[in-house]
Amino acid sequence: MTIKVAPSILSADFARLGDAVTAAAEAGADWIHVDIMDGHFVPNITIGPPVVAALRRVTRLPLDVHLMIEHPDRYIDAFADAGADLITVHQEAGVHLHRTVETIRARGVRPGVAINPATPVGALEDILPFIDLVLVMTVNPGFGGQRFIANSLRKIAAVRDALAHLGSAGVEIEVDGGIAPDTAGAVVQAGATVLVAGAAVFNERASVAANVSMLRKAAA
């Protein structure tokens, strides 16, 4: 499966989000990752459907919306209407996870499920046949710029093996947290197919294009 790079706008300049997304697209990014936080499920607050709708107007890239929120079912329609191409909810936040996933798919959006660092891969066993993406959090969610948790490599490999056992090798394995040139190669080797990177893409050390290129080289 081709490795995809999904820059996270969490690390972009919020005063120039449109420009940041355009720069990512011109750099060859595959998806745009949008972190939605509510201040309850995670200790931070970010953006909502109106910003996703604004981003939809400035890019044709798939919008990969990651709901780090309580009661995600209440907001699926809003984010689908705003133009999300993928919506990922947390295993830890869903009371009726299968219903949530089916609701996402019924809206014509690809569903994903995320797990936090302390959540075992076995918690995904019964939902794996119904989703298009597994997001393995490689830091504790809530803030960008954190250090990669090394034990995550074992979890990524376990997800890969579980999907292979089901015959679902086409399901994307996305990783989010501490992804940079020094970690990209290891997570891809473990089984990751989508690399979410915020601070490694949007920073003042190099251009967005140079940073995306470095990630791709490291992943290869």
Image (spheres, rainbow, N blue to C red):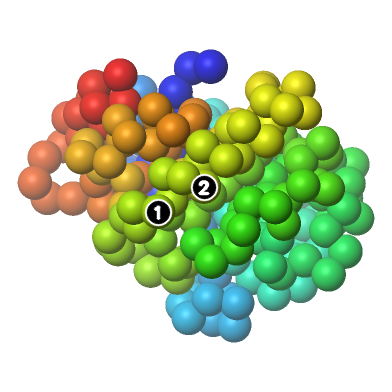
Question: Is 112 positioned to the left or the right of 127 in the image?
Answer: left
Question: Is 120 positioned to the left or the right of 58 in the image?
Answer: right
Which picture quadrant has residue 73? bottom right
Crowding at dot 1, Cα within 10 Å, few <14 / some 14-19 / many 20+, comes out as few
Crowding at dot 2, Cα within 10 Å, few <14 / some 14-19 / many 20+, comes out as many
Q: Residue at x 63, y 51 (%)?
A: 121
Q: Position of residue 70 (x, y in %)?
A: 69, 74
3D distance between C-alphas at marks 2 and 1: 7 Å
Residue type beneath disc 2: Lys
Which picture quadrant has residue 131? top right
Q: From this view, report whether residue 4 is shown above or below residue 53.
A: above
Q: Residue at x 44, y 33 (%)?
A: 190
In the image, 7 versus 166, the foreground residue is: 166
Q: From this view, report whether residue 203 is shown above or below residue 41.
A: above
Q: Position of residue 143 (x, y in %)?
A: 38, 69
- Tag 2 near tag 1, CB within 8 Å: yes
Q: Residue at x 40, y 53 (%)?
A: 151
Q: Residue at x 87, y 53 (%)?
A: 98
Name the residue tied to disc 1: 151
Question: Is 107 positioned to the left or the right of 175 in the image?
Answer: right
Number of numbered tags placed on the structure image: 2
Q: Which mark is residue 155?
A: 2
Q: From this view, report whether residue 66 is shown above or below residue 74.
A: above
Residue type beneath disc 1: Asn
Q: Position of residue 72 (x, y in %)?
A: 74, 66
Q: Position of residue 108 (x, y in %)?
A: 82, 36
In the image, 217 versus 78, the foreground residue is: 217
Question: Is 158 positioned to the left or the right of 4 in the image?
Answer: right
Quadrant (top left/top right/bottom left/bottom right) for the C terminus: top left
Q: SS at mark 1?
A: loop
Q: SS at mark 2?
A: helix
